[in-house]
Amino acid sequence: MKARFWGVRGTAPVAGKNYVKYGGHTICASIESAAGDLVIIDAGTGIKRLGERLMSGDGSGRLEVALFLTHFHLDHIIGLPFFAPLYSSRAQISFYSPLQAKETEKWLGGLMGGRYFPIALGETSSAKDFVRVEEDPISIGGLEIDQCPLNHPQGSVAYRVREGEKSIVFATDTEPPDGKLDERLSDFCRSAEYLICDAMFTPEEFSLRQGWGHSTWQHGTELARRSGVKNLILSHLNPDYDDRQVNEMVRLARREFRSTAVACEGLSFEI
């Protein structure tokens, strides 16, 4: 598998000279199997560049897109109206979410409805279907995707993407219940090669932000250590944190879990 980050911020996109190293787009990542099967996680503003990449070929042949949404807060879907394959008649886009298919279509349609956007979701040229993610794994070619509910206002899910014996877990937008380890999530992450984890707040801020549905780098390192994962990548970065603050965050995190990195736009890795 090959994974790549297209956006790593939470809440809102940011820009400026102090946000160059890690980037300012909101959450979006892609995973590609050895055979070229593609899964996209979330549709933050980072999905715009991914869409341009997908449409940059010779323009022939069917384009299959599997888009898995963790939830429907704006930072995770706001890039969808600017996703180029949405407007291509050769694209087949399957939207996966923890909601019923009709609900997913409703909420995404509302994003592009009324006076919010000049083109309705249903008027775009791509073929679309909407699928609820339930307990049974979903197969996308050689990839298998499982989900785990997370502790977040209005709900969210983590996704575990497997190919063979290797797996990557995406678990942003989650808060440890009562500030303690989420045992269900820990079991879900068990022995994964990579854990991409929420690192929205510092430990000091967390005491003032409980109930907001987010975690800290310290929660991430504990989860990685207790779950036996091999590599931790901190993501869903606070838009208020500039490059210097993120550098300090990863420095502290590596004291507790050595194999820690921070997600940044364009970062890719293979397993």
Image: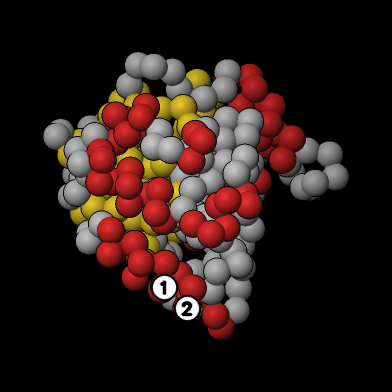
Q: Are the residues tagged 2 and 1 within 8 Å (C-beta)? A: yes
Does residue 60 appear left or right of residue 16 in this picture? left
> Around disc 2, counting alpha carbons within 10 Å, would you say few (fewer than 14), some (14 to 19), or many (20 or more)?
few
Mark identifier at residue 22? none
Judge depth for marks 2 and 1 and give the one in front.
1
Q: Picture coordinates of residue 28 (x, y %)?
A: 47, 51
Residue 102's image quarter?
A: top right
Residue of label 2: 244
Q: Amino acid at mark 2?
A: Arg
As rendered, which of 57 and 144 lies closer to the eye?
144
In this view, the residue farthest toward the right is: 115
Q: Residue at x 69, y 27 (%)?
A: 106
Return the x and y of residue 233 as percentages of the image width and height.
Answer: 34, 55
| Residue 138 spot, x, y in % from top left | 34, 23
Question: Which mark is on residue 248?
Answer: 1
Percent across and percent down for residue 97 are 51, 28
Instruction: Please say whether residue 250 is visible from this viewpoint.
Output: yes
